[in-house]
Amino acid sequence: MEKVCLFVDDNLQRDVIDNIPPRAKVKGLNVTCYEFNPTDREFQNKDLDIDFEKVKQVLQDNWQHRKLDLIACDYYFGDDNVNGLSIIEFIRTFNQKCPIILYSGNLVKIIADILQGYNGRNPQPLVDKLKKLFRANIADFIDREDYTNDVITLLKETPLEMIIADKLMEYADYEFKSGYLAFKGMKLGQIAKALRNNAPQAGEFKQEIIEQAIAHLIALNEEE
């Protein structure tokens, strides 16, 4: 089974990433790893800080319409205004289903950032940050020392919506003409995007696909 991973980090651990494809191969997975460094010179402003608008543009241009089975993102990039959670929040604007791992060499730093501004009297800043964390729908928080097993485990558990979306993208320009009224007239690529973004109709469409697939299997067996 083909799988695609995106690693967002300013200091990639080459030994970890290089170790993932051969170990995943043993599990029946063919994994392709891509890398993205938000601190590269092309993303810096005149003050040498991260220009988040440039980062967002490249992420959206490169990954909004492509197969993506897992994202592993570092938390700390040495920038006061952009961290891993910022990156994940943006990715969730165009892909709400892809599993995401957030890792750090200092997990205490993540907790400290979340608690920052909470004085014990006014809980609202903490509540707001926790809501933001929940909306990011992060699959796991892990230490950055060696996350190979975590990546492979999540790749084996790809959500059904992502599997359907990836298959639809192979025929992205085909028009959907029947089977589910809400998506009638849409391109299959548009439907794939709706599944990835967890559109209200996504659950019903998935159910319809399953029911039709089972009905087709039954019909095939009755013909024999």
Image: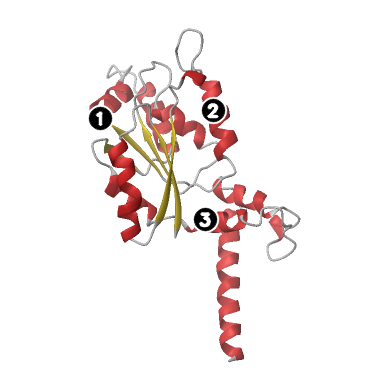
Mark closer to the observer (3, 1): 1
Q: Give the quadrant of the C terminus.
A: bottom right
Judged from the image, the secondary structure of the residue bearing numbered disc 3 is: helix
Q: Earlier in the sequence, mark 2 or mark 1?
A: 2
Q: Position of residue 26 (x, y in %)?
A: 31, 60
Q: Position of residue 73 (x, y in %)?
A: 38, 35
Residue drawn at x 61%, y 48% as measured from the top left: 194
Judged from the image, the secondary structure of the residue bearing numbered disc 2 is: helix
Q: Which residue is mark 1?
A: 105
- Left/right placement of residue 51 relative to residue 78 reads right
Q: Earlier in the sequence, mark 2 or mark 3?
A: 2
Disc on res. 161:
3
Mark closer to the observer (2, 3): 2
Q: Which residue is mark 2?
A: 56
Q: Residues within 10 Å of mark 3 (few under 14, many from 20)?
A: many
Q: Residues within 10 Å of mark 2 (few under 14, many from 20)?
A: some
Q: Disc 2 residue type?
A: Lys
When asked about the image quadrant of residue 147, the answer is: top left
Q: Disc 3 residue type?
A: Glu
Front position in the image: 132 or 35: 35
Residue 200 seen in render = no
In the rendered view, would you say 182 is above or below 136? below
Front position in the image: 171 or 86: 171
The CA distance from mark 2 to mark 3 is 24 Å
Q: Give the quadrant of the N terminus.
A: bottom left
Q: Disc 1 residue type?
A: Gly
Residue 146 seen in render = yes
Front position in the image: 48 or 71: 48
Q: Position of residue 92 (x, y in %)?
A: 50, 37
